[in-house]
Amino acid sequence: MVGRRGEVTLGVILVHLIAEIARHAGQADIMRESIDGVAGLRTANPNLFEPADGWAAHHARLTAIAEGAERPGA
């Protein structure tokens, strides 16, 4: 089948469908998190990263790494 943007194959349709489902699932998850206040998959095991030394130390560590990295073209 040929559409306005060229040939439409089953592969093109599947990729588009998967992208749309992922986008809407993400939006629904954000809405659910704002309603119930729980982030992640489960309350008991949220599967979210939590730095052992806290977020402030993690941020400082990443900032130091970024500031020490070479800038492209510099």
Image (cartoon, grey):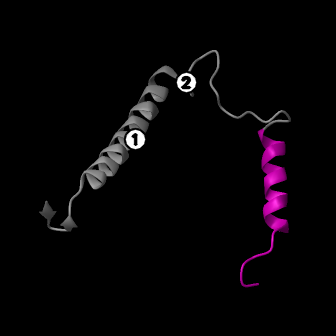
The residue that disc 1 covers is 22
Q: What kind of residue is marked 1? A: Ala
Disc 1 secondary structure class: helix
Q: Is residue 50 one of those drawn in magenta?
A: no
Image quadrant holding the C terminus, namely: bottom right
- In screen coordinates, is 18 left or right of 54? left
Quadrant location of residue 55? top right
Q: Number of marks in the image? A: 2
- In screen coordinates, is 45 left or right of 50? left
Q: Is residue 25 above or below residue 44?
A: below
Q: What kind of residue is marked 2? A: Leu
Q: Is residue 72 one of those drawn in magenta?
A: yes
Q: Nearer the viewer, residue 1 or 34?
A: 1
Binning the other alpha carbons within 10 Å of mark 1 as few (below 14), some (14 to 19) or many (20 upward) gives few
- In screen coordinates, is 24 left or right of 51? left
**x then y, percent, for residue 10:** 25, 51
The residue that disc 2 covers is 41
**x then y, percent, for residue 30:** 45, 34
**x then y, percent, for residue 23:** 38, 43
Sequence-first tag of 1 and 2: 1
- In screen coordinates, is 47 left or right of 62? left
Disc 2 secondary structure class: loop
Dominant SS of magenta comes to helix
In the rendered structure, which segment of residues is drawn in magenta? 55-74
Disc 1 to disc 2, how far (Cα)?
15 Å
